[in-house]
């Protein structure tokens, strides 16, 4: 039997002092709030997701990381230095310029919707021996395309 609420908020990777162990075959959800500082940026959320996985007690399973909202996305990408993240932002800016889309007539963020749609709202990562099954060079990123935002909600769903 697991002891955990269906949704807890994790701020800056710190989980409140609660028991959240999941038993085999159970599904658990945790919501991480992420603040963004620029209109477009990639924010490394790997430490927060790792904390959720660790607190779950699941040793073998799957974590799905999903951002709520139509102008942000989730991406697995390299975090060795900032150049890859800058390249992603620059590539998308050149491929999907700002101010030329029909939706821009509504609220000026047509490019944000297109970028988020192309990258996608979620990634799934295996949980292996209680840890994220990412390679040495892989990290999980929240891709902000319409910031800054005070609190993007990222839902982590753990299947174990």
Image: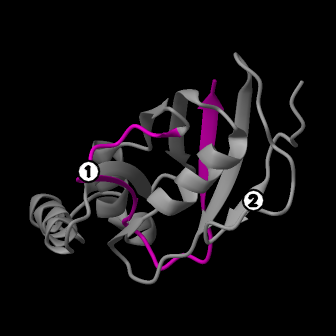
Q: Looking at the rendered structure, which numbered label has been put on residue 98?
A: none
- Of 28 and 110, the residue lying toward us: 28
Q: Mark 2 points at which residue?
A: 9
Residue 58 lies, with reference to residue 132, above or below; the image says: above
Residue 106 lies, with reference to residue 28, above or below; the image says: below
First of labels 1, 2 by sequence position: 2
Tell me if residue 115 is in the magenta stretch.
Answer: no
- Of 23 and 32, the residue lying toward us: 23
Looking at this rendering, what residue extends furthest in the top direction?
A: 25
Q: Mark 1 points at which residue?
A: 136
Question: Which residue corresponds to the image point at 63% horizontal and 47% vertical from the top-left?
Answer: 54
- Of 82 and 107, the residue lying toward us: 82
Looking at this rendering, what residue extends furthest in the front direction?
A: 129
Query: Which numbered mark, 1 or 2, is in the foreground of this view?
Result: 1
Query: In this image, 141 relative to 30: left or right?
Result: left
Query: Judging from the image, what secondary structure is the residue with disc 2 in?
Result: strand
Rendering quarter of residue 51: bottom right
């Amino acid at each position: 039997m697991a002891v955990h609420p269906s949704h807890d908020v994790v701020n800056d990777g710190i989980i409140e002092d609660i028991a959240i162990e999941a038993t085999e075959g159970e599904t658990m959800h945790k919501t991480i709030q992420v603040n963004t500082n620029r209109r477009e940026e990639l924010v490394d959320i790997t430490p927060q997701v790792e904390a959720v996985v660790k607190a779950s007690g699941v040793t073998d399973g799957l974590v799905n990381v999903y951002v709520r909202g139509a102008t942000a996305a989730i991406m697995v990408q390299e975090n060795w230095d900032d150049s890859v993240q800058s390249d992603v932002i620059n590539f998308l800016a050149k491929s999907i310029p700002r101010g030329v889309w029909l939706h821009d007539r509504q609220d000026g963020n047509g490019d944000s919707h297109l970028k988020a749609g192309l990258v996608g709202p979620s990634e799934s990562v295996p949980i292996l021996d209680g840890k994220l099954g990412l390679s040495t060079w892989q990290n999980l990123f929240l891709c902000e395309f319409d910031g800054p935002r005070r609190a993007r909600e990222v839902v982590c769903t753990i299947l174990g």
